[in-house]
Amino acid sequence: MNSNPSAAPITFSPYRVGAMVRRYWYLLVSSWPRLLDLVYWPAVQMLMWGFLQMYVSKNAGFAAGAAGTFIGAVLLWDILFRGQLGFSISFLEEMWARNLGNLMMSPLRSTEFVAALMIMSLIRLAIGMIPVTFMAMAFFGFNLWGLGLALAAFFVNLILTSWAIGIFVAGLLLRNGMGAESMAWTIMFLFLPLTCVYYPVSVLPDWLQYVAWSLPPTYVFEGMRALLIDQVFRSDLMIEAFAFNVALFAAAAYAFIRLLESARVNGSLMQTGE
Amino acid sequence: MDTTTPAAIAVDNLVKRYKAATAVDGITFHIAPGSVTGLLGGNGAGKTTTIATIMGLVTPTSGTVRVLGATMPAERYRVLHRMNFESPYVDMPMRLTVRQNLTVFAQLYGVADMKARIAALASELDLTEFVDRPTGKLSAGQKTRVSLAKSLLNRPDVLLLDEPTASLDPDTADWVRGHLERYRAETGATILLASHNMNEVERLCDRVIIMKRGRVEDDDTPQNLLSRYGRENLEEVFLDVARGRGEKRETVG
């Protein structure tokens, strides 16, 4: 009989989280297309918006152009979007590999799985975004790192939102199988117009502004514009964003638990195909 | 079974319904520690749902499933580290090498001295030659042996096997069966085996549970089944039960 003390059940095991991070790391380094994909699209986006900003600032004398709001916005948007994709793609890798059954039957807890997906989201984001921030510096003289502590506040709030959405999507995938895969790729685009990535909230109709202000990233993008255009760091916006993020994260975690329970009732964990 | 010994797996009045469809319809069986039990049945008999419930992947509609004393799925984390399984319906990640896959799962199961354990299993299951090759590059038979190695990593007390020799050539299948026999003899593990290979069931199992339409149709030792159905082998017994043409010589006790 098994008497291995290291295998004794405990509530949360960083060791098992490490096992899952190891699994995704092995996958990443074994596949150059996966690595290239992390950098390719953020670089293309940054270049496109950077040149557009140059054109706008030259032809319309748009004051914000010089302040780098477009490049700043696209880089912060990529933190939000790529953070969620990094989480969701790692989860999808298990479904594509038909490995989810092995994991669900192992001692790996849901919280450990989610923690590993969060860590992988950060690793994938770092691989993709750090080179692109240096490209932004080289091409357009925009130094994202120069935002200092403000960047840290923006990053924390954006990554929390991306993880909350990633957790919710993982629940949908567990419950509905690969039929919900498209949600992993598209759900964040709902945030693109509503969180006012490229324009101020005041542009929206009054009724839609209420919706925008209920989404944490809106505070970050407004805060970024305040910093770049008015040179003011709005800590009040960051605190409000954090409060909304706590609520969003709690709601996503609750939805995940319910969807996982529902998957056990419906037998979805046995069949993770369409 | 000895009623004084707590069952390794205890299924009591298990019912599982998916909307209007009843997959498992009130089955009861207790499996003694250290035994090898075959779970037989045609497609749609309820074997997969039963095994999934034992593994904690499915919540019963009613009834209870206990494994090593833990109620599934509510208390699964008490015992999952003492269980493992192998099935052709799940894969190991294809891009990872055999060694990488086994290392990840050894870490998930908290295996002490992972390198030595993986080396020992690779040697026992004849994986050494391709242990550093991507799992996706292996033949079907080699992949099955890798899955079997994964299922034995943590030296499980309860091992659930779903078609463990499917896609293996007769020689390799025979060799795998021999390995399972040795594993049970050395560790005293409880094995529940779902298989359509009746020779395999006759060779490995102390007891056979035959399911049909979500119910336990028969439950006895292979020898008693052969005797009661008046047949030469379990395949004929299986066909009798599946086609409803067999007459049992006496009532199942």
Image (spheres, rainbow, N blue to C red):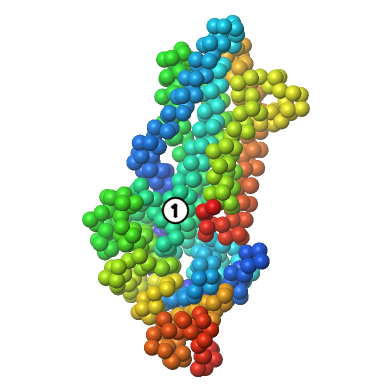
Q: Is residue A209 left or right of residue A272?
A: right
Q: Residue at x 64, y 38 (%)?
A: A248
Q: Nearer the viewer, residue B19 or B236?
A: B236
Viewer-side residue, B214 vs B36: B214
Whole-percent x and y of residue B33? 44, 75
Q: Residue A245, image x and y in percent?
A: 63, 34
The picture places residue B207, in percent across and down from the top left corner, at 44, 81
Q: Residue at x 66, y 23 (%)?
A: A236
Secondary element under disc 1, as helix, strand or loop, is: loop
The residue located at (36%, 68%) in the rendering is B165
Task: Identify residue for label 1.
Answer: A99
Can residue B153 be seen from the camera position used here?
no
Above-or-below relation of A144 to B95: above
Circle 1 Cα neighbour tier, 10 Å, few/some/many (<14 / 14–19 / ≥20):
some
Q: Is residue B151 left or right of residue A222?
A: left
The vertical placement of A112 against A125, above or below, is: below
Figure quadrant of the N terminus of chain A: bottom left
